[in-house]
Image: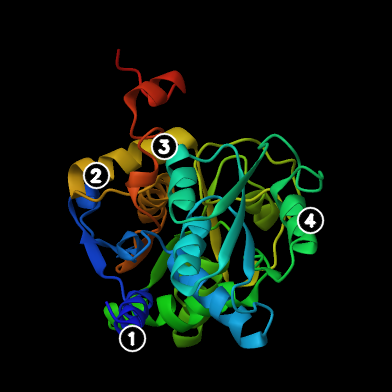
Amino acid sequence: MLVGEAKVMHDTLLKRVGNTPLLPLEKIFKDFGKTVYAKAEMLNPGGSVKDRLAKSMIEAAEANGSLPPGGTVVEVTSGNTGIAVAWVCAIKGYRALLVMSDKNSEEKQNMMKLYGAELVLTPHTVMPDDPRSNYKTAERLAETTPDSTYLDQYNNPANIDCHYQTTGPEIWEQTEGNIDCAIIGAGTGGTISGVARFLKERNRDIKIIAVDPEGSIFAPYFKKGELITPEHYEVEGIGGDKLVGAMDFDVVDEFVTIGDREAFLNTRELARVEGLFCGGSSGAAIAACRRVLKSHPEIKCPVTILADSGNRYLSKLYSDKWMIEKGYLNRP
């Protein structure tokens, strides 16, 4: 293959990020007599919504000169951003140095390493300000690694902006402006904040409802203005243990809290009933949709986001053994 042909192939792959389909979910919501529309982000090239973010942050770093040719990209991740950063770095010729909590699945760890990334695991039991935490570890690596840039998705303006520029407009166009409620997981906050800012500009009456796992600090902070001590939860990709710049609470109307068991059982049902193979945060979103439709019967065109593929959770929520050990399944 000629060099020019290889560049065209890579550019084509990067251009395939976004413009994901909006799928009607009818069977799983048949008891409500309504259709929930789901943005299928697992159909991005790297298998998750974080492909949008990784591409945006790396291109922003290139543009502002903080990432030199052949440099190192440092990032904290719960998995999906790391996978996305790893494959984008592989295409663009950067070194990827990723920091992740040891609670996240082996599938995610292996995918990052297979894309050529170097992975540093941190204990999930430590608090954010502990020197061993993923945040502090990433900061230290960025300071000591030559020609490196720390993307910091939790506070990077490109996180919100990429969803304001792409995901939000896509949802608006795909629903022909009829969307009246968006039910989206809150992790770094970038997806829901960017989508919400765009949609609220088009129609301020659109309800924006954030999905948070039990144990996260976001929902209690939103409801009472209090910072609780975070507790462990198994669902990956949503929730937070500290306040971050990419989470814009001002554009959110309501928070719904979902437990691990409910999230995982809904995820498995989504695969069994709708044929959609997704991660646990998607199940949390489906569970939240059910609650929202009960409490807001006036909603006519709800939209949610299926953030990633189930292939990175085979050893966890898709494993009967793991589910039984955790007490989420009762079957022998």
N-term-proximal mark, 2 vs 4: 4
Q: Kindly identify which residue carries mark 1.
A: 4
The residue located at (45%, 44%) in the rendering is 110
Cα distance in 3D space between marks 2 and 1: 41 Å
Tell me the kind of residue under disc 3.
Answer: Glu
User: Which image quarter is the N terminus in?
Assistant: bottom left
Q: Kindly identify which residue carries mark 3.
A: 262
Would residue 85 be found to the left or right of residue 244 on screen?
left
Cα distance in 3D space between marks 1 and 3: 49 Å
Cα distance in 3D space between marks 3 and 2: 15 Å
Tell me the kind of residue under disc 4.
Answer: Arg
Residue closer to the observer: 296 or 85? 85
N-term-proximal mark, 3 vs 2: 3
Badge 4, how many Cα within 10 Å: few under 14, some, many 20+? few
Badge 2, how many Cα within 10 Å: few under 14, some, many 20+? some
Residue closer to the observer: 203 or 296? 203
Q: Kindly identify which residue carries mark 4.
A: 140
Residue closer to the observer: 12 or 30? 12
Would residue 106 be found to the left or right of residue 216 on screen?
left
Cα distance in 3D space between marks 2 and 4: 41 Å
Tell me the kind of residue under disc 1.
Answer: Gly
* Residue 36 at x, y percent in the picture: 28, 61
